[in-house]
């Protein structure tokens, strides 16, 4: 997860080290740009301030909305006569149109754990099958990238040949030094843009294969990761794994975020 939340490639921007240039790619994004930078801000904040234990740190805090009225669903701690504390969630009912119902946090977690167990149950053989299927789903795009690389390399070499001829013209005194410099700068600029494109397509193909492998690796370990994480880490993982979580009465509704939905569909 840390790799994905630290690499701009996963929200849609590839980086060329050679040219120090960011460029949008067309591969499927694993995280939104907003989540990427929000996590970056959190990391920066933690480096500046010592961490404190927050007694009101809840797994679903800030993630849920009411499916009926659209208001926020908030957590609160209730203390039983025995002194034992429990966490409950309910719609804030800010619009006054809902009947406020309380649901324990452990009940909200039940469908989440069920999904995590499905991921955990994916066998090695199924992982190999999924890897092939996920790659197959992108064969057309990969083939397009190969054709683009071939075209760009051809253009790059054509420009290089023009630069060589331009140098010959200068040596033969067929053009002035000023004309040579002007034309050379124009050709070099075109080469620079093509170089960035070459880096983009090359990195995109390599990163895609790496991403598919990491997605499967994370998916099969996600239950263990979730159970061993701190509360704020569990919340971050859920924010990454599920979409549009909403509470309707006492039932939690959500969808699995891409590409993990595809993993479950194919499995």
Image (cartoon, rainbow, N blue to C red):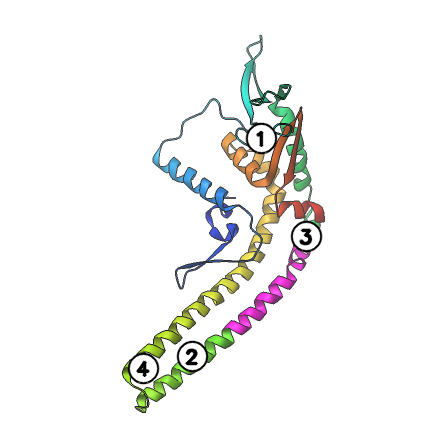
Separation of residues labelled 2 and 1 (CA atoms): 57 Å
Q: Would you place residue 21 above or below residue 239 in this image?
A: below
The tag earlier along the polypeptide, 2 or 1, is: 1
Asked if marks 4 and 1 touch (Cβ < 8 Å), the reply is: no
* Residue 267 in view, yes or no: no
> Please, what secondary structure does the residue beneath circle 3 have?
helix
Which residue is labeled 4 in the image?
Answer: 179
Q: Nearer the viewer, residue 212 or 251?
A: 251
The residue at the point 67 percent across, 48 percent down is 262
> What segment carries the magenta color?
129-152
| Marks 4, 3: nearer the viewer | 4
How far apart marks 2 and 3 lie (CA) works out to 43 Å
Would you say the residues marked 2 and 4 are in contact, meaning their CB atoms lie under 8 Å apart? no
* Crowd band around label 3 with a 10 angstrom C-alpha radius: few (<14), some (14–19), many (20+): many
Question: 10 Å neighbourhood of mark 1: few (<14), some, or many (≥20)?
Answer: many
Task: Identify the residue shown where x is 60% and y is 63%.
Answer: 142
Residue 253 x, y percent position in the rendering = 66, 33
Helix or strand or loop: what does disc 4 sit on? helix
* 137 inside magenta stretch: yes
- The span from disc 4 to disc 1 (Cα, nearest Å) is 65 Å
To which residue does mark 2 refer?
A: 160
- Mark 2 or mark 3, earlier in chain: 3
Residue 80 visible in the picture: yes
- Say whether marks 1 and 3 touch (CB < 8 Å): no
On the image, numbered disc 3 is attached to which residue?
A: 130
Report, in whole angstroms, how far the alpha carbon at label 4 lies from the one at label 3.
Answer: 57 Å
Sequence-earlier tag: 2 or 4: 2
Q: Nearer the viewer, residue 9 or 50?
A: 9
């Amino acid at each position: 997860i840390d790799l994905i939340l630290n690499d701009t490639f996963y929200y849609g921007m590839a980086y060329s080290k050679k040219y120090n240039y960011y460029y949008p790619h067309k591969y499927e994004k694993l995280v939104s740009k907003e989540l990427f930078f929000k996590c970056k801000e959190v990391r920066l904040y933690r480096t500046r301030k010592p961490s404190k234990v927050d007694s009101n740190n809840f797994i679903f805090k800030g993630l849920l909305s009411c499916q009926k009225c659209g208001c926020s669903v908030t957590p609160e701690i209730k203390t039983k006569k025995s002194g034992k504390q429990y966490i409950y969630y309910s719609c804030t009912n800010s619009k006054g149109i809902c009947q406020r119902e309380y649901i324990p946090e452990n009940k909200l977690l039940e469908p989440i754990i069920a999904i995590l167990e499905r991921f955990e149950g994916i066998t090695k053989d199924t992982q190999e099958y999924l890897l092939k299927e996920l790659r197959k789903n992108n064969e057309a795009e990969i083939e397009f990238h190969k054709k683009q690389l071939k075209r760009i390399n051809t253009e790059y070499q054509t420009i290089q040949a023009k630069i060589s001829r331009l140098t010959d013209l200068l040596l033969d005194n067929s053009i002035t030094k000023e004309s040579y410099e002007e034309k050379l700068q124009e050709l070099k600029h075109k080469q620079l843009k093509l170089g960035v494109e070459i880096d983009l397509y090359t990195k995109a193909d390599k990163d895609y294969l790496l991403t598919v492998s990491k997605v499967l690796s994370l998916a099969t370990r996600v239950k263990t990761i979730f159970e061993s994480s701190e509360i704020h880490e569990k919340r971050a993982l859920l924010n990454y794994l599920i979409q549009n979580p909403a509470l309707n009465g006492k039932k939690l509704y959500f969808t699995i975020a891409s590409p993990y939905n595809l993993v479950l569909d194919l499995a």
